[in-house]
Amino acid sequence: MIKDLIVNLAVGTQRDPARDYALSIAEAFDAHITGMALIYEHPLPGPVLGQLPAELVGQALRQHRDAVEAAVEQFDAAAKRSGVSADHIIEKALARDAPAVLANTARRFGTSVITQSDPDGADNNRLIQALLFDSGRPVNIVPYIQRDGLKLDRVVCCWDGSRPAARAIDDALPFLTRARAVDLFIVINEKTKSDQREIRGVRMGRHLARHDVKVEVKTTVAPDIDVASAILAYVADSAASMIVMGGFGQSRLREFILGGATRGILASMTVPILMSH
């Protein structure tokens, strides 16, 4: 059961898909929701900052802080309309420290919610990576085109027998037990072919069924480089409303870098994703 969640609030925009989606989760589970907004002490890139007069720098800082306060006010008003228990957090941080600040805060909540990076808006990739690899909690990533709240008509759980996939599926149980239909989806390739360990989904399907999850095992064949495309095609064809999957990455200089399939899904996603590592 989800008791509380935190949402990263969009700043400088009226529409906030993550905020609205997170509020619908809070409503569905009667959970407490916290909206978090980050005030960047230097909201402009370093090279730009050094070339501007002090007056313009001060003006940019004031505009940024005003936008943060507006985002919080919009969240508070939306939470009041939804009738959910809510509060907000405003944290100051340097841009380079923002992902760590967000991930550290998210550890105190059952799950987090954030919007996918928008090609014409906010780049949230570093924040998403931090939530996925450093918070120790599942993260719900919402498409920047999302307009609907939480829907659980059909949930696609991506299964390859890996530890991140197992973690994600168990983290998603509060959603899966409420879903009308759950597909345990396996992309068959050299990494997931059947062997004595049983990786085709039978035992995981039984595990979910024991939790009263209405699950069916579905498979498709695709090479490893096309896993993301195969998942997204199946989600579109099945009219799924949520994806559950493990998030993969490689450690580089003390920071996790998203794996190819994970990066491909996040770039082209069309429905919300619950992802765990």
Image (tube, rainbow, N blue to C red):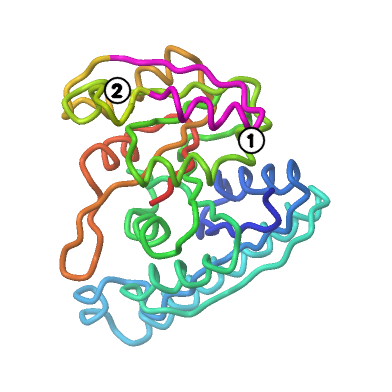
Q: Position of residue 199 (x, y in %)?
A: 33, 28
Judge by depth and name the residue closer to the eye, 239 or 275.
Answer: 275
Residue shown at 25% from the left, 27% from the top: 192
Q: Identify the amino acid type marked 1.
A: Leu
Q: State which region is magenta.
A: 201-220
In the drawing, does residue 253 fall left or right of residue 165? Answer: left
Outermost residue, front side: 196
Residue 126: image quadrant is bottom left
In the drawing, does residue 71 fall left or right of residue 264? Answer: right
Q: Position of residue 76 (x, y in %)?
A: 72, 61
Residue 150, numbered circle:
1
Q: Position of residue 132 (x, y in %)?
A: 39, 55
Judge by depth and name the residue closer to the eye, 96 or 230.
Answer: 230
Q: Nearer the viewer, mark 1 or mark 2?
A: 2
The mark nearer the N terminus, 1 or 2, is 1
Q: Which residue is mark 2?
A: 187
Q: Is residue 102 above or below residue 79?
A: below
3D distance between C-alphas at marks 1 and 2: 26 Å
